[in-house]
Amino acid sequence: MDSKKLDSDLKGLVTFKIDNEEFGIDILSVETIIRMTEITKVPKAPEYVEGVINLRGSIIPIIDFRKRFNLKPREDGKNTRIIVANIDNKQMGFIVDSVSEVLRLPVSLIEPPPAIVAGIEAEYIEGVGKLDDRLLILINIEKLFSISEKKELNEILK
């Protein structure tokens, strides 16, 4: 089997935790991972928008994954990180409890999301990766926000 075929059968992921659940997003969307920093609140922002930060001269919105997924809030810990990703050619940061690892997952180990989460609310769940004794919920961050939510986020940055 040639190596190009082998590479295309692997999906590069950045994995992170929220509570005891492990998630993964496509590594090609991730620009950097930074330690938690001071976030400036933005008036009238949606509840899941924690605020904005200045990252190397760019003002980027920070999204709290806990709030986005309707999970209970938690104090930031020493492992709390912000994953800075590119969505529709715009930088956005996502607060996670911790970043686990960068891995290459064989596509054969990814299954479609279970029917119970396949509703419109969860269209951003791309699939479930099976790794030995753990499951990884794969998030398509391009589909994390509706068109109206993207417009609302763009308004914040004007």
Image: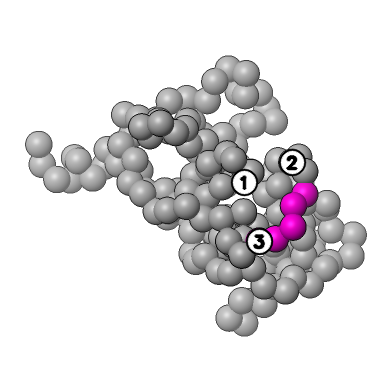
Disc 1 residue type?
Ile
Q: Amino acid at mark 3?
A: Gly
Residue 71, label in figure: 2
- Secondary structure under tag 3 reads loop
Please determine whether, in this image, residue 33 is positioned above or below residue 94. below
Q: Earlier in the sequence, mark 2 or mark 3?
A: 2
- Can the viewer see residue 92 in this picture? no
Tell me the distance, in whole angstroms, between the alpha carbons under discs 2 and 3.
Answer: 16 Å
- Of the residues under marks 3 and 1, which one precedes in the sequence? 1
Residue 76 among those drawn in magenta: yes
Residue bearing mark 3: 77
Find the residue positioned furthest to the right.
Answer: 44
Vertical comparison of 40 with 118: above or below: below
Q: Position of residue 156 (x, y in %)?
A: 79, 64
- Residue interval drawn in magenta: 73-77
Q: Position of residue 107 (x, y in %)?
A: 33, 34
Mark 1 touching mark 2, by CB under 8 A? yes
